[in-house]
Structures are given as C-alpha cells and as structure tokens.
Image (cartoon, rainbow, N blue to C red):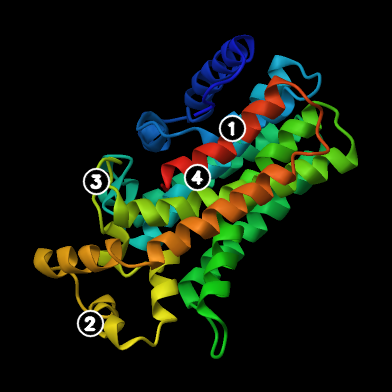
C-alpha cells in the first residue's frame, strides 16, 4: 500500500503493523470460546488495514513510542471492524472479505452484540491513551452513526443527491480515516496546526478511496470484486449519480436500467457496458484526481521526510487504482 518509499521506513511500518495484527487477535479474546470466535471472525478474514497504516505513518512524522503507536492503531481498527458487523446487519450482507458475514454465519443479534463487544474493547484501549483520544473517538463514532442513518434514510426532498452521497461517504468513511491520521499525529506530539492538516488529509483521502471503489465496481475485472456488485444492490455511487443528472435522450436506456431489477446477468452486463463506454467514468476519475490533489495539498504543513513522502504516495495510489 505504501508504494515506493524509504526502505528503513517500510521496515519500521511493517514491524509495527505486525504488532497490531497480533494484538488485534488478542483484543478480540472474550470470556467464552463462542464470543471469541465470533469477534475474531472478520479480523481473521484479513483486510487492507488501511487505518492502522495511516496511524503508523502519521505517528512516524514525529517521535512516538512503539506501544503508543500500536495502541492508537488498535483503537482505530477495532472501531472499524466493529462498525463492519453493524454495517453487514444493515445491508443484509452475505459475505465479508470473502467469508460468510457474521450475520449470515450466526444471526443479526450475534453480529450486533459482537460489534458492541469490539467497540467496548476499543474503548478500554483508548482510555489508556488519554481523554483527548476518548473525545475524538466518541465524536468520530457519532459521525459514523449519523452517516449510516443518512444513508439508510436517503436524501431529503429537494436535497442534491450527489451532495448527500458525498456527505454520507465523508461521515461513514472519511471520519474514521481522519481520526486515524489525527491519532498518529497525537501520539507523535505534533502541534495543533499539524494535527488539523493530518485530519483534513485523512478525511479527503478516505473519501477518494471510497470514490475510487465506485469506479472499480464498474470498470475493473481484476480487482477481486465481482463487477456490478453495487449496481445490482442499487447502491448509489459517484458514476451512477453523475449519470442520473443527465437529461440526454441517449441516456434514457441506461437510466431505465439503473432503476430496474438487475438480478438478470444479461441486464447487468448491459448496464456495465453502457457505463464503461460513457463519458461519466472519465468525469468520475477527474473528481478523484482533483480530490487526491486536495489531499496532497493538506500535507504541506507537515514535517518533511520519508513518512510525509509515503502519505503523498497514497494520493498517487488513489489516482492509479481508479485509472
């Protein structure tokens, strides 16, 4: 994920993330074997560990002890994983990270309670870092919940659909990634201006990573994700929302299909073909490029060095993965 970066930094980051992985499993150990199995279910399925990575890189902008870095990263990943249990219940998901989702393997009640258990574990760890960390985690969790509610309820009458979607992405995805970069800066002892820059960078890079996933759902056949998953589920994405703003007669068929039942493979294939040939994909990629550059600009006040370079490299990765 870090890309072409300083070798010494890469080795330090790898070592810290290995510690995070071990302690993630430990944090999910409960008083019974059943709860432990359920709590480790999503953790054991793997994942990008993007939030811990950002905690680590931000922390390495300054001076921070390994244990502080690992605890901060644990809080962010546990909060993220806990939210996934709840998301899967909301979405009635069948699969998570290539394995049956917890709600599918057990039931909704177990999935919700296991998510609560992992939130509690995150809260126990964040309390060891200090009240300012507790405050940020709580405010971030409030945004996550509000983002989920906004997504569930949909845009209000007269509200711009795209603006609503971007706010949902910022609240559900950007907020926790912003908190991750802020946590890293906090354990590194950075100043208020630098922490604000890190939070702004984190929120922007979080949003653009989600927007790039929107394009991958349509354009990629090599990502490991079945193309059209979001389309079939009727999930709004950047390209489809841009298309919905169209009044061109040539888009009538595409718009009709977007509102139709896409359970038939032939209909889904037709929608994918129309979207892949549509200028809207290039429009979406331009949105991502512009927002990635905004994220990069937020790095300006931060200390120069290998960690800052690695954060900038993530901006390039966002653009590349959506190309």
Measure how far apart labels 4 and 3 are at the Cα level.
17 Å
Mark 4 residue crowding within 10 angstroms, few (<14) / some (14–19) / many (20+): many
Q: What is the number of the mark on residue 313?
A: 1
Q: Is any atom of residue 81 visible in this view?
A: no
Q: Is residue 153 left or right of residue 252?
A: right
Q: CA distance from mark 4 to mark 2?
A: 30 Å
- Reading the image, the residue beneath label 2 is 253
* Drawn side of residue 85 relative to residue 10, left or right: left
Q: Splitting the image into 4 quarters, where does residue 128 fall? A: top right
- The mark that comes first in sequence, 1 or 4, is 1
Tell me which numbered mark, 4 or 2, is placed earlier along the sequence. Answer: 2
Residue drawn 72% across and 54% down? 139
Identified at 32% across, 70% down, the residue is 234
Q: Is residue 72 above or below residue 176?
A: above
> Marks 3 and 2, how far apart in space?
23 Å
SS at mark 4 in the image: helix
> In the image shown, does 47 or 57 lie closer to the viewer?
57
Q: Earlier in the sequence, mark 3 or mark 2?
A: 3
Which numbered circle lies on residue 319? Answer: 4
Distance between the Cα atoms at labels 1 and 3? 24 Å
What residue sits right under mark 3 in the picture? 221
């Amino acid at each position: 994920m870090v890309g072409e970066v300083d070798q010494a930094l890469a080795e330090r980051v790898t070592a810290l993330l290995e510690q995070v992985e071990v302690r993630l499993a430990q944090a999910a150990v409960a008083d019974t074997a059943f709860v432990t199995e359920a709590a480790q279910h999503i953790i054991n399925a793997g994942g990008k560990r993007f939030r811990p990575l950002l905690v680590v890189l931000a922390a390495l902008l300054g001076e921070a002890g390994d244990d502080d870095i690992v605890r901060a990263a644990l809080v962010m990943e546990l909060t993220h994983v806990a939210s996934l249990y709840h998301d899967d219940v909301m979405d009635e998901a069948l699969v998570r990270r290539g394995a049956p989702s917890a709600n599918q393997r057990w039931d909704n009640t177990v999935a919700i309670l296991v998510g609560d258990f992992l939130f509690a574990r995150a809260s126990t760890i964040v309390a060891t870092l200090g009240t300012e960390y507790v405050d940020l985690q709580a405010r971030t969790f409030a945004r996550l919940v509000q983002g989920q509610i906004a997504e569930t309820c949909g845009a209000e009458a007269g509200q711009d659909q795209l603006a609503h979607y971007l706010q949902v992405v910022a609240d559900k995805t950007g907020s926790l990634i912003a908190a991750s970069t802020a946590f890293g800066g906090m354990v590194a002892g950075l100043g208020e201006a630098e922490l604000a820059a890190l939070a702004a960078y984190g929120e922007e890079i979080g949003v653009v990573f989600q927007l790039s996933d929107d394009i991958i759902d349509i354009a990629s056949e090599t990502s490991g994700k079945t193309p059209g998953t979001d389309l079939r589920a009727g999930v709004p994405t950047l390209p489809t929302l841009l298309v919905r703003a169209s009044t061109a007669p040539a888009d009538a068929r595409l718009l009709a299909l977007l509102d139709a039942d896409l359970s038939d493979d032939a209909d889904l294939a037709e929608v994918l073909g129309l979207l892949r040939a549509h200028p809207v994909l290039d429009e979406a990629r331009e949105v991502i490029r512009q927002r990635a550059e905004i994220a990069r600009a937020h790095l300006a006040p931060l200390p120069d060095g290998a960690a800052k370079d690695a954060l900038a490299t993530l901006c390039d990765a966002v653009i590349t993965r959506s190309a």
